[in-house]
Amino acid sequence: MDDKTHKVMITERAEEAEYYAAHQMPYIVWLNEQNHGEHFPSGSYCVENLSDIDARYLDRVYRRFYDIPWDITETARLRIREIAVADVPKLYELYSDARVTQFMEPLLADPEQEVLYTKEYIDNVYRFYGCGMWVLEEKTSGQVIGRAGLEYKEGFEGLELGFMLGTAYQHRGYAYEACSAILAYGVGELGQRVFCSHIDENNTASIRLCERLGFAAQGKVRLNELDSDGRMTEKEFVQYIYRADTQ
């Protein structure tokens, strides 16, 4: 974000919220006894205590209204943020190496479909869950070097940790650095205590990373995944579990 002043309105009145929503003006609804029972626009950011509104919260409301990626967290070498459509071409560069897609889903074969998928992901996953797969940006170069993040996976306990790095950036400690920060974010910011990861049994590098992070193997599961043509296939993975209370 630049140093300009950006406005986020705070209201307790439904008619004002409707006006702000119709005019695409960032706003927050303060819920209290006076407006109990009133109907506010769907998707409104609501708080019950004004003390919950701090600079970071205001920044995130503003960014969401104007489709500006959230900054999630950072490490000594990495900025971890939400994906933007502009990142898609760089992701194709990273995924073009067969070693990257050997153990994970590839991008869609049609870049236009991948752009559409990314737009829908931003609208439906980030907006609804407040988390998802994020991009890893190297601070010194500003380059996107991979992805990592936390996703809800139906039928499984906790959030699923996923990660990938371009081959040029592997074996430099980036994956451990990013995933450690993301797990800390999941515990501290999202209030999660349990995390899972599903790894091909032949993916020894990812298995070593999970074990170093504190995950433990819990048996095998079969999961559906998409191929590059958008077709669903079933594959077996080893399930790893991380419990924050035991670390």
Image (spheres, rainbow, N blue to C red):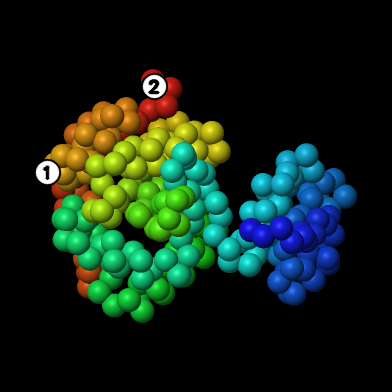
Disc 1: CA contacts within 10 A as few (<14), some (14-19) or many (>=20): few
When the figure is inspected, residue 39 is found, relative to residue 205, above or below; the finding is: below
Residue furthest toward the right? 34
Residue depicted at x 78% and y 39%? 51
SS at badge 2: loop
Relative to 137, is 213 on the left or the right?
Answer: left
Residue 197 in the image: state x and y as whole percent. 30, 41
The answer to whether residue 13 shows anywhere in this view is: yes
Q: Are marks 2 and 1 in contact (CB under 8 Å)?
A: no
Assign the C terminus to one quadrant of the image.
Answer: top left
Disc 2 versus disc 1: distance between alpha carbons?
A: 26 Å
Instruction: Please report whichever mark, 2 or 1, sits nearer to the chain's N-terminal start.
Output: 1
SS at badge 1: loop
Question: Label 1 is placed on what type of residue?
Answer: Asn
Residue furthest toward the top? 246
Residue that badge 1 annotates: 202
Question: Label 2 is placed on what type of residue?
Answer: Gln
Residue 120 in the image: state x and y as whole percent. 45, 68
Residue that badge 2 annotates: 247
Residue furthest toward the left? 202
Assign the N terminus to one quadrant of the image.
Answer: bottom right
Residue depicted at x 42% and y 66%? 87
Residue depicted at x 41% and y 74%? 116
